[in-house]
Image (cartoon, grey):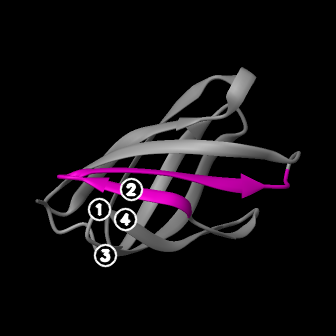
């Protein structure tokens, strides 16, 4: 199991440009809690799951419009890479590094 806990500086390549956010992860067995803080606000992690070196979670956003984003990311040492899915708007790559 990868060391997924900590603070991660992430960038999502969205149609609105690069969206930088700070992800915090505190795992407890096969679940985790934390937050996702960026220029468009702060939100708590929902349904955080840990499966080896893979994290899955969702967040509710209100800007630019209310929606739930689902994220899946893989931790590899001090790197994190994954995909943010925004419902009908599609999926966007996300990457980052341990802060």
- Residue at x 31% of width, y 75% of height: 28
Mark seen at residue 49: 2
Q: Which residue is mark 3?
A: 28
Mark seen at residue 31: 4
- How far is disc 1 from disc 2 in space, using C-alphas? 6 Å
**Which corner quadrant of the image does residue 41 belong to?**
bottom right
Q: Are the residues at dot 3 and dot 4 in contact (C-beta closer than 8 Å)?
A: yes
Mark earlier in primary sequence (2, 4): 4
- Residue at x 61% of width, y 51% of height: 19
Secondary structure category for the residue under label 2: strand
- How far is disc 2 from disc 4 in space, using C-alphas? 4 Å
Q: Percent position (x, y) of residue 60? A: 73, 55
User: Which quarter of the rendering shows the N terminus?
Assistant: bottom left
Identify the residue at the far right of this view: 65
- How far is disc 1 from disc 3 in space, using C-alphas? 6 Å
Q: Main secondary structure of the magenta part?
A: strand
Magenta span: 46-63
Q: For the residue carrying disc 2, how many other residues have a C-alpha within 10 Å: few (<14), some (14-19), or many (20+)?
A: some
Q: Are the residues at dot 2 and dot 4 in contact (C-beta closer than 8 Å)?
A: yes
Q: Magenta stretch containing residue 29, yes or no?
A: no
Q: For the residue carrying disc 4, how many other residues have a C-alpha within 10 Å: few (<14), some (14-19), or many (20+)?
A: some
- How far is disc 3 from disc 4 in space, using C-alphas? 5 Å
Above or below for 67 versus 5: above
Secondary structure category for the residue under label 1: loop
Q: Are the residues at dot 1 and dot 4 in contact (C-beta closer than 8 Å)?
A: yes
Q: Are the residues at dot 1 and dot 2 in contact (C-beta closer than 8 Å)?
A: yes
């Amino acid at each position: 199991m990868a060391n997924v806990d900590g603070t991660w500086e992430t960038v999502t390549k969205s149609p609105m440009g690069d969206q930088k956010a700070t992800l915090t992860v505190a795992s407890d067995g096969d679940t985790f809690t934390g937050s996702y803080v960026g220029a468009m606000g702060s939100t708590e992690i929902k349904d955080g799951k840990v499966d080896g070196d893979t994290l899955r979670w969702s967040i509710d956003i209100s800007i630019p419009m209310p929606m739930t984003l689902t994220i899946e990311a893989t931790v590899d040492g001090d790197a994190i890479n994954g995909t943010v899915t925004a419902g009908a708007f599609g999926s966007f790559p996300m990457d980052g590094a341990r802060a």
